[in-house]
Image (cartoon, rainbow, N blue to C red):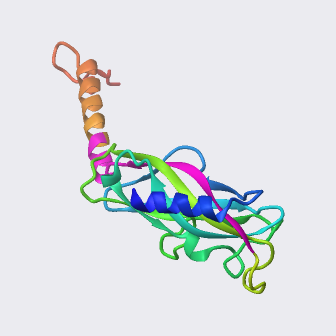
Amino acid sequence: MKTTLTILLTLTLGGVAHAAPLLTLNPSVGPVYAQPGDTTGWGFTLTADPLEWTTIIGTVVLNQTLPTLGEFTDFISGQGGPLGGVLGPGAPDWVQYFDAFNGTGFGSYRIDPSALPGDVDTGTFLVLYETFSDNPNTCGSCFTGSGALTVDYAVVATPEPSTWVLGLLGVAGVAAARLRMRYTPPNGRTALSQVPRR
């Protein structure tokens, strides 16, 4: 809570840019899924501010409904932007797909090994950024403000494949037993023995 208040106070004192970049997660609709102990995550598309240079400086997780489900790892702020850690004004969209091995995309979410299938965590990502009137790597002192973007997320723990396979085999076994009972004549002979011989 203290960290969140400090961040919000810093944003207020630092000023807010007159325009803002636009962030979309990929997938943008619906939850992401993973088995307990596994990792899932999001890619993203970041559309540039039309007038200012932007760099992503951090991501905070807010309003989690089930914090014990897993742990989020931020990827986007470690990069800041596509070129030298910044996204220039009017530049093409910065697009990255999620890749846990290479650490690309918006971030990853590792589901706790003790999570139960069907457990769900929802919340909001608060993505912090700073803006500059010129390229901050070369301009010296051109900071113009800071801001935050918010995007909602949902993560669902799924059963292990072996659980699905056992469940499907059970359903198939019940279906086969019912079919056999349905096609066994009352006299006890099988349907095959009733086929007339030539």
Q: Residue at x 60, y 49 (%)?
A: 28
Q: Is residue 82 left or right of residue 171?
A: right
**163 drawn magenta:** yes
At which x and y percent is residue 159?
32, 49
Between 18 and 177, the one lying in front of the other is 18
Quadrant where the image shows the C terminus: top left
Q: Residue at x 76, y 77 (%)?
A: 142
Vertical order, 69 against 143 (above or below): above
Quadrant where the image shows the N terminus: bottom left
At which x and y percent is residue 49?
77, 62
Task: Locate residue 186: give its quadrant.
Answer: top left
At which x and y percent is residue 169?
28, 42
Residue numbers of the magenta segment: 143-167
**192 drawn magenta:** no
Task: Locate residue 95: give its quadrant.
Answer: bottom right
Q: Residue at x 27, y 59 (%)?
A: 113
Q: Residue at x 22, y 24 (%)?
A: 190
Q: Is residue 81 left or right of residue 188?
A: right
